[in-house]
Image (cartoon, rainbow, N blue to C red):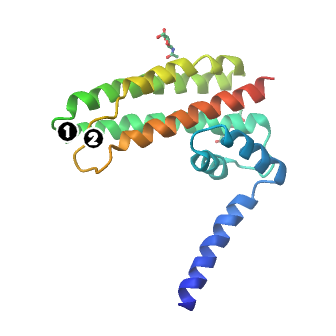
Amino acid sequence: MYRILLIFSAITLVCSVAEARLDEKTQQTVNEICKQTIDTKFCRAVFVKNLMTSSPSKNDLLNVTVTEAERFSGNTCFFISTLLRNAGDERADLQMCAEAYAIVDTAFTKALSFFSQGLYDKILNLEENVSNGIGICKTDFSVSGYEINPLIEKNRETMVLMAMEKIVGHMASS
Ligand SMILES: *[C@@H]1O[C@H](CO)[C@@H](O)[C@H](O)[C@H]1NC(C)=O
Ligand SMILES: *[C@@H]1O[C@H](CO)[C@@H](O)[C@H](O)[C@H]1NC(C)=O
């Protein structure tokens, strides 16, 4: 019992150290941003995992956001291609999602390129493309091997990343 407690407190300590890495002002900013998304926990984890300094600038926050969004959509495209390999009845639905995430990935890739050119306001215009893409990937079908369609979570996390780009993009361009 004692050992379990010890392990548990070690894990808690590691987690709180990761949080404490960000200074108070940054934690506040991150909370402000993430509160406006539909998955606060996922949003915070993206920042905590990827911010390189404890007191990042708005530019650093935007960098993490656009970089992670692009990485996420690329990974999701790959993930869907692996699902398609073993697909049965769900093939047509998965193909729609593959098309959808190609659109999302193009938009997030473009956002990353706008970011590197300092064209922050242009990032905001891509929100519509991402929304359209997510709308094309319907998730009311079952995927063999999964109890819950894994694309439900991908769509939710994509919406969070899109919201993060919009919120941080506004902050950085004002
Ligand atoms: C963005 O972050 C990456 C590391 O993730 C870094 O290599 C790059 O220099 C950053 N770009 C800007 C403009 O801050
Ligand atoms: C965004 O959507 C519009 C209209 O569908 C399209 O013409 C444009 O190429 C898209 N932009 C990107 C970067 O995907």
Which residue: 57% across, 19% down? 126
Instruction: Classify 148 as above or below 159.
Output: below
* Cα distance between the residues tagged 2 and 1: 6 Å
The answer to the question of whether label 2 and label 1 lie on touching residues, with beta carbons closer than 8 A, is yes
Question: Which quarter shows the C terminus?
Answer: top right
Q: Is mark 2 within 8 Å of ligand 2?
A: no
Q: Position of residue 145 (x, y in %)?
A: 24, 50
Residue at x 57% of width, y 80% of height: 7
**Residue highlighted by disc 2:** 83
9 to 36, vertically: above or below? below
Q: Position of residue 143 (x, y in %)?
A: 25, 42
Above or below 152: residue 107: above
Report the residue marked by disc 1: 87
Image coordinates for residue 148, horizontal then vertical, percent: 32, 47
Residue pictured at 57% horizontal, 48% vertical: 42
Q: Position of residue 5 (x, y in %)?
A: 58, 84
Q: Amino acid at mark 1?
A: Ala
Assign a secondary structure to mark 1: loop
Closer-to-camera residue (82/155): 155
